[in-house]
Amino acid sequence: MTVRQPATWAYLAVFIGVLGHSTSEFVSVLTGVSGPEVSVWRYVLGAAGLVLFALLRPATRDFWRPLAAEPVRIVLLSVFGISLPMLMFHWALDFATVIQVATLTTTIPIWVAVINAAVNRQPLGPGKIFTGIAAFLGIVVLLTDGYLEKLSGDGDNLFGIFLGLACAATGSAYSVLAKPLILHYGGVRMMALTAGIGALGLWVIVGAAWGIWVNPFTLLDRPAGEALALATIGIWNTTIGMLLWFWGLAAVPDIARGSYLFFLKPVIAAGLSLALLSQPVSWLQFVAIAVICGAVAIEFFWPRLTGQHARS
């Protein structure tokens, strides 16, 4: 039986998970590898961290137990909700820019709200529709600012955009479909199990399709900077970020509202671009950031603004 945590802690966990997601694109450029290969490194190391964490806790040492009860459901969820989204995420960085991929994956709250409405019959409501449209418009501005004139070039960038959107859609489906399992079996147990299966699936997919068979035991053979970046993207961006993000979404009263925190990702990405990559932020992007932050704030305070004191 799962004990419900206070909503405040759940929302805080989601926000810290967003911070982990927001820095992954920047850490990945320091790893010395790219595309499908970096996705394997990330999830093999990240899943290892989750499995180790589960084994260190007496209550979750039997983290594989749910697999015996629901093998097909969990394997499909792991492959289509973990392996494929992570493959598409890092592969997209080979074709689209860091800020574009960061922005495209920020459509996750929209996907979560829509999929949750379809699967769980939870109505969107006028607040979510209004703030979702406002945030989406902000995302469009961030995505297209300084880029529209380049659309007439080759199709590589558009392929990267497609991969980014596909990553957001499949990852969102995992958030919604995994929630009942997380609430029933526990967040640590399910994260360790699905990440472990997903990492194995990703390792096989990339090895078979690209001929890249990653050996995680060679991590320390790499240059120190690259090894540190790979360890960071595995432990901080994946083990910690994934655990807090998915546990938080499963624990919040309103999964769609909780996922709206992900709209803040391009704000964090823009700040990191300015600080780390010396990529200037235009005035139009500042306006878009203000719109996104405003939409998130309105969504969280919507019950009070409308006189509806929802449990959130």
Image: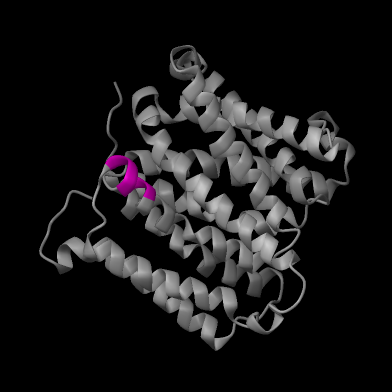
Quarter of the image that includes the N terminus: top left
Front residue of 128/43: it is 128
Percent from the top left, x then y, of residue 255? Answer: 33, 47
Q: Which color mode does the image show?
A: one colour
153 shown above or below 97: below
Range of residues picked out in magenta: 115-120
- Residue 310, position as x, y percentages in the image: 16, 53
Nearer to us in this view, 205 or 249:
205
> In the displayed structure, does residue 170 sit left or right of residue 252?
right
- Which residue corresponds to the image point at 42% horizontal and 72% vertical from the top-left? 292
When asked about the image quadrant of residue 217, the answer is top right
Residue 117 sits above or below residue 210 on the image: below
Please indicate whether residue 128 sits to the left or right of residue 169 in the image. left
Residue closer to the observer: 179 or 119 = 119
The residue at the point 36 percent across, 39 percent down is 250
* Residue 262 falls in image quadrant: bottom left
Q: Main secondary structure of the magenta part?
A: helix
- Rendered residue at 36%/53% (across/down): 114
Whether the magenta-drawn stretch holds residue 126 is answered as no
Residue 107 is left or right of residue 300, and the answer is right
Is residue 305 shown to the viewer in this render? Answer: yes
Is residue 293 something one can see in this rendering? no
Residue depicted at 36% across the width and 65% down the height: 132
Q: Residue 138 in the image: state x and y as whole percent.
A: 46, 75
The image quarter containing residue 134 is: bottom left
Picture layout, residue 126 above or below residue 67:
below
Question: In the figure, is residue 268 to the left or right of 135?
Answer: right
Looking at this view, name the residue that lies furthest to the left: 307
